[in-house]
Image (tube, helix red, strand yellow):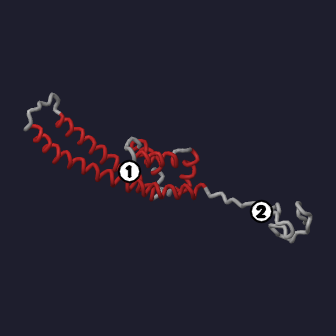
């Protein structure tokens, strides 16, 4: 084999010419790309998603409890402070806020429980985990910013058709 640039003889398996220093074309210089197994990649994402759903859901339930505590202790104090002023309220804002905070806490606990089930099922590779996580993602995507982030990540990873086929390969039988 000879160098295509200077014509000098090349050693077997040489990557560069000894005379001119140019690279020798051929299989020795061709970069080798290893394509990762899609099932293994999905398996890694499913593990990360399971952990994220558990952490996010526990956080969501703690925030719901904090919301209830806030509405129980802080709103009556605010109502008492405003009742001593001479400003009349035409709308019963504090009653509305109690109801609003109660509904927010119920939503937080419900989505937290759904997320815990989804995260635990993903970590156990249950067959129903993919659908459960997708449902949780659609519900939690409105919870800016963390719910949106984990919801979009879940939908991007688990929603496509090829992900459904790959998940069937890693799912444990019931």
Going by the picture, which residue comes out furthest to the top?
A: 90
Percent coordinates x, y for residue 99 in the rendering: 21, 38
Callout in the foreground (1, 2): 2
* Residue that appears at 76% across and 60% down: 30
When asked about the image quadrant of residue 35, the answer is bottom right
Give residue 38's position: percent from left, percent from top.
60, 54
**Label 2 SS:** loop
Give the mark count: 2
Tell me the CA gap for discs 1 and 2: 49 Å
Residue 71 higher or lower than 33, as above or below: above
In the displayed structure image, the side of residue 27 where residue 76 appears, left or right? left
Q: Residue at x 45, y 51 (%)?
A: 129
Q: Is residue 110 left or right of residue 155?
A: left
Q: Residue 125, percent across and down?
A: 48, 57
**Residue 26 versus residue 55: which sits nearer the camera?**
26
Q: Are marks 1 and 2 in contact (CB under 8 Å)?
A: no
Q: Looking at this view, is 100 or 86 the one in front?
A: 86
Q: Residues within 10 Å of mark 1 (few under 14, many from 20)?
A: many
Closer-to-camera residue (86/127): 86
Quadrant containing the N terminus in the rendered view: bottom right
The picture quadrant where one finds residue 83 is top left
92 sits to left or right of 39: left
Q: Is residue 71 above or below residue 122?
A: above
At which x and y percent is residue 22? 82, 63
Residue position marked by numbered label 2 in the rendering = 29
Q: What is the crowding at mark 2: few (fewer than 14 residues within 10 Å), some, or many (at least 20)?
A: few
Q: Earlier in the sequence, mark 1 or mark 2?
A: 2
Residue in view at x 42 percent, y 58 percent = 51
Residue 78 vs 167, above or below: the answer is above
Q: Secondary structure at mark 1?
A: helix
Residue farthest front in this picture: 20
Residue underneath mark 1? 115
């Amino acid at each position: 084999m000879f160098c295509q640039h200077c014509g000098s003889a090349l050693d077997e398996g040489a990557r560069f010419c000894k005379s001119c220093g140019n690279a020798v074309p051929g299989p020795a210089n061709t970069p080798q790309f290893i394509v990762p197994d899609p099932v293994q990649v999905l398996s890694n994402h499913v593990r990360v998603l399971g952990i994220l759903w558990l952490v996010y859901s526990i956080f969501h339930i703690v925030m719901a409890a904090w919301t209830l505590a806030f509405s129980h202790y802080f709103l009556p104090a605010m109502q008492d402070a405003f009742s001593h002023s001479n400003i009349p309220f035409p709308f019963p804002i504090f009653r509305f806020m109690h109801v609003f905070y109660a509904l927010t806490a119920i939503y937080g606990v419900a989505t937290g429980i759904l997320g815990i089930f989804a995260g635990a099922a993903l970590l156990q590779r249950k067959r129903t985990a993919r659908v459960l996580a997708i449902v949780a993602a659609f519900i939690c995507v409105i919870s800016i910013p963390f719910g949106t982030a984990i919801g979009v990540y879940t939908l991007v990873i688990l929603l496509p058709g090829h992900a459904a086929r790959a998940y069937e390969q890693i799912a444990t039988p019931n």
